Amino acid sequence: MIMVVAAVCLGAQAPDSRVRAPRFEDYPAREVWQGKPPSLKLVTHSERMFRTRLTEAANQAPNFAGHYRITYWGCGSNCSAGAMIDLRTGDVYQLPLATPNGSGWERWIECTACFDETGEDVHVDSSLMVSRCGLNYSERLHKNVPDTYYFLWEGATFRRLLFIPGKSAGK
């Protein structure tokens, strides 16, 4: 089963044509979990600020890496915030573009330049996340070309695999 969240397929290639962009099938999840989620572990003030949204999301099916649920909420015009919930443990994690060690709203803001063709692309059966964010207007294409980040979830942290600046794609 494949689930796509805010899916946008730009077909972006790495600036160096010898580098192949990571693919979802290259990073399979071990299993797709279908159990009953435990209580959320809302430890920090920043996590408790979004108790209702996080609780609602924790009661939905996984949409990333087998047993995680990624959820989003607005934070103003052209702004996106969100979190990732481990449905097995109840732990809550920041998304990879959020401010590390931020507090309050800042902890959850993952993109302040949300436009068409931005967002995350995730699959329930893969631990790869493709994030698109940023304002890089292309005169040639007559549209915004966001930066593209490829992240691998490694069980406790996201590791960036590849970054493709939108400016290089929109020349």
Image: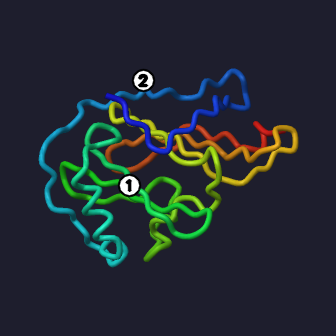
Q: Amino acid at mark 2?
A: Glu
* Contact, mark 2 vs mark 1 (Cβ under 8 Å): no
Residue drawn at x 32%, y 65% as measured from the top left: 53
Residue at the location (45% across, 65% down)?
108
Q: Residue at x 72, y 54 (%)?
A: 135
Label 2 vs 1, first from the N-terminus: 2
**Front residue (pair 128, 3):** 3
Viewer-nearest residue: 42 or 162: 42
Horizontal relation, residue 119 to residue 156: left or right: right
Which residue is tagged 2? 25
Q: Quadrant of residue 14?
A: top right
Please tell me the numbered disc located at residue 71: 1
Tell me if residue 113 comes above or below residue 107 in the rendering. Answer: above
Most distant residue in the top direction: 18
Residue 90, x across and y down, in percent:
21, 57
Q: Amino acid at mark 1?
A: Thr
